[in-house]
Image (tube, rainbow, N blue to C red):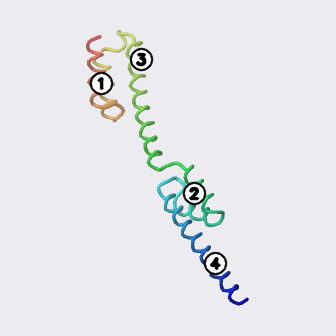
Amino acid sequence: MEMEMEMEIVRAIVIFTVWIIFSVVVGLMGRKRKIGFWWAFLLSFLLSPILGLTVVLYSQNKKDEAYKGKKLQSQRRQQEALNLLVELKQSDSSKNSVANELEKLKKLRDEGVITEAEFEKLKNKLINS
């Protein structure tokens, strides 16, 4: 009887130790994701390591989030350059001289809205039109 009780205690300790180890592993997986280590660890510890792992895998990767931010910034710069091109095409030649448009392009380049290569391309397009 006493031997069975000791075996149950040992079994409970082993299960608890494995539970904590799996929770730490899930937490380590979560540190590179938006959920973070501590939320992943707590979720897997309190609910289940399998549930915690599922949530961690559905959580966004931090690198993906940074990439999306850079991509969005690049798209905004391109949209501003396109808007400038449309404005250049639609503008009255008497209102805006080529020199004024070149100044606008230079300002956009200096502010970092367009790159040097984009500036050169737009400048050539403006001069040749």
- Residue 96 in percent (x, y) is at 35, 15
Callout 4: SS: helix
Pick whichever of labels 2 and 4 is earlier in the sequence: 4
Q: CA distance from mark 2 to mark 3?
A: 50 Å
Identified by mark 2, the residue type is Leu
What is the secondary structure assignment of the residue under circle 3? helix
Query: Observer-nearest residue: 39 or 115?
Result: 39
Q: Earlier in the sequence, mark 3 or mark 1?
A: 3
What's the residue type where badge 4 is placed? Arg
Residue at left offset 55%, top offset 66%? 22
Could you say whether the residue bearing mark 1 is in a helix, strand or loop? helix
Q: Which residue is mark 3?
A: 86
Q: Amino acid at mark 1?
A: Glu
Residue 51 spot, x, y in % from top left: 63, 57
**Mark seen at residue 24:** none
Residue marked by disc 4: 11
Q: Residues within 10 Å of mark 2 (few under 14, many from 20)?
A: many
Q: Is residue 93 above or below residue 106?
A: above
Label 2, label 4: how many angstroms apart (C-alpha)?
24 Å
Residue 123 placement (x, y as % from top left): 27, 20
Of the pair 42 and 102, the residue shown nearer to us: 42
**The C terminus lies in quadrant:** top left
Which residue is at the front of the view, 46 or 121? 46
Which badge, 3 or 4, comes first in the chain's sequence?
4
1 over 71 or under it: above or below: below
- What residue did someone put label 2 on? 53
Q: Which residue is mark 1?
A: 103
> Relative to 100, is 40 on the left or the right?
right
Q: Quadrant of the N terminus?
A: bottom right
**Cα distance in 3D space between marks 3 and 4:** 73 Å
